[in-house]
Image (cartoon, rainbow, N blue to C red):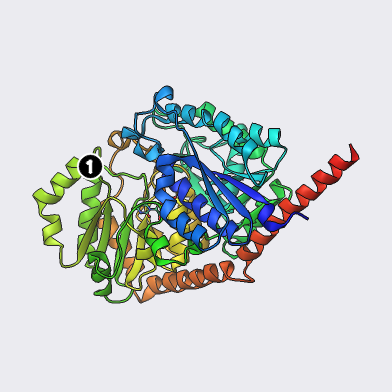
Amino acid sequence: MTKLAELNFVVIPLLSTSHLIPLADMAKLLAMQGVTVTLLTTALNAARFTAAIDRAIRSGLLIQVVELEFKGKEAGFPEGCENHNDAPGLNYRRQFFAAIDMLQEEAEKALEEMKPKPSCIISDAFVTWTVDTADKFQIPRIVFDGMSCFTQMCRHNLHILNDQKKIPESGTFVIPDLPGRIEVTKTQLPSHFNPVGTVYIQDIRDRIRAAEKSAYGVVINSFEELEQRYVDKFRKLYDNRVWCIGPLSLCNNDDLDKVQRGNKALFDKESSLKKWLDSRQAETVVYACFGSLGRLTVVQFVELALGLEASGYPFILVIKTGEGQAPIEEWISKNGFEERTKERGLLIRGWSPQVVILSHPAVGGFLTHCGWNSTVEGISAGVPLITWPLFAEQFLNEKFLVQVLKIAAGVGCKSIVPLGEEEKFEVQVSSNAVTEVIIKVMDKEKEGNKIRKRARELGEMAKRAVDGGGSSHLNVTLLIKEIQEFQLNQSDKNALV
Ligand code: UDP
């Protein structure tokens, strides 16, 4: 068997913030088991997690970062941007994926020279050239697409239904062949099944799907106890090679790692955010954030802000900065919202240290857009969720939280709002709906109490899963063993030739 340190797991994230975050965590998690991990990315993206990775390296973990040159300009991607999130208007998807393809040649050169020799690739599902690279180097390619097994199974069954042209145009329907009764409408489905919006990239999506199907195995940012019935089903699609190794965010034991996860943020004992949270009573604060990409129109933002205010609960509201945000800032100042709510509300502009906030005892509810990272971070923190899905597979995550886990209640979104095209779609959520659902979830009596109790139990379960002897901890060791055995089989085969 190859010694652990001589196994080299090459991790290739998509250059998009919410893909880099879990894969940087995964790099640490694997290295904690004694294997070598090589992260391939570009200079500006590496800068987002260098501090944490440097700390990990200093602590003795075998992690190396290889910086590739990003040729975005040649692909028509805006100059100076190396990350999908940084492109103005988010309408450069085609150019972005062209630039991602251009990384292949340099990456393969790096793999040739790499020490120790690469043992496997952990590839973001959206980086499709790794199919050829893994073939060339005769190593397994394990994909990570940042979803739960529940959502994977929903998508799998929806694809079958879609191929049969049986997705109803209107009304609710039940996703077939799933444990539990999951009701959706076409308008809530990801773009593959519901192509709304103009920036739709079917050919790239098809390529990603094919690459995902051909993978050797899949790693999942989830834990088995959370969704065992769906894990079991999903495993059948990959000959059992599915490893649930999350929640990945829980690998950050160091306070600074938590604070700096994904971007720069401030949360030392002097910071106003920490003081603000420390001054609140336990489980009273609603934290509202729409992930790294999600945006609301000013009209929709007003409903959210007024709904939060009317709920009477203290709140933290994360507001994006940059392009398109001026009307929101204008409303805030003209309406006097920030001034009026300053005793009770805190606005964070830009990047918030989400996992730190969620784990603070003052936080009692998480209003989320249901991106899977945020969803699993909320579950890990043991807080009930208020769901406000926007796009991609977020409505499916909402179903999982509300209908399966029963640790959330929704604001009542009906349809996908494609990213970058928010202005073309109508307001879906009124301030009254926001207030009502917050009161329902935050209420310590009645239904809110049940939701909170279940959320707390799942939070404990999540922590046990990543601890020594827990299911996710065990799955990391099984994944490493799988690669060791693969290498052993390869060398036996080569010896026979
Ligand atoms: N995030 C954060 N601070 C922010 C916004 C987002 O730390 O102000 C992190 C969040 O903790 C999560 C990720 O960014 O890890 C967002 O991923 P998710 O899958 O929830 O949503 P996406 O950004 O893909 O829509």
Residue at x 82% of width, y 47% of height: 489
Please provide percent x and percent y for residue 258: 41, 62
Residue at x 42% of width, y 23% of height: 74
Q: Is residue 342 above or below residue 7?
A: below
Residues 173 and 249: in front is 249
Residue at x 52% of width, y 37% of height: 168
Please provide percent x and percent y for residue 263: 36, 51
Q: Is residue 263 above or below residue 85?
A: below
Q: Is residue 201 above or below residue 430?
A: above
The amino acid beneath tag 1 is Gln
Residues 262 and 115: in front is 115
Q: Specify the farthest residue to the right.
A: 496
Q: Is residue 327 left or right of residue 467?
A: left
Please provide percent x and percent y for residue 67: 49, 40
The residue at which mark 1 appears reads as 325
Q: Is residue 246 above or below residue 493?
A: below
Mark 1 crowdedness (10 Å alpha carbons): few <14, some 14-19, many ≥20: some
Q: Is residue 332 left or right of residue 146?
A: left
Which quarter of the rendered picture does the C terminus lie within? Answer: top right
Residue at x 18% of width, y 41% of height: 326
Quarter of image, res 181: bottom right
Where disc 1 sits, the SS reads: loop
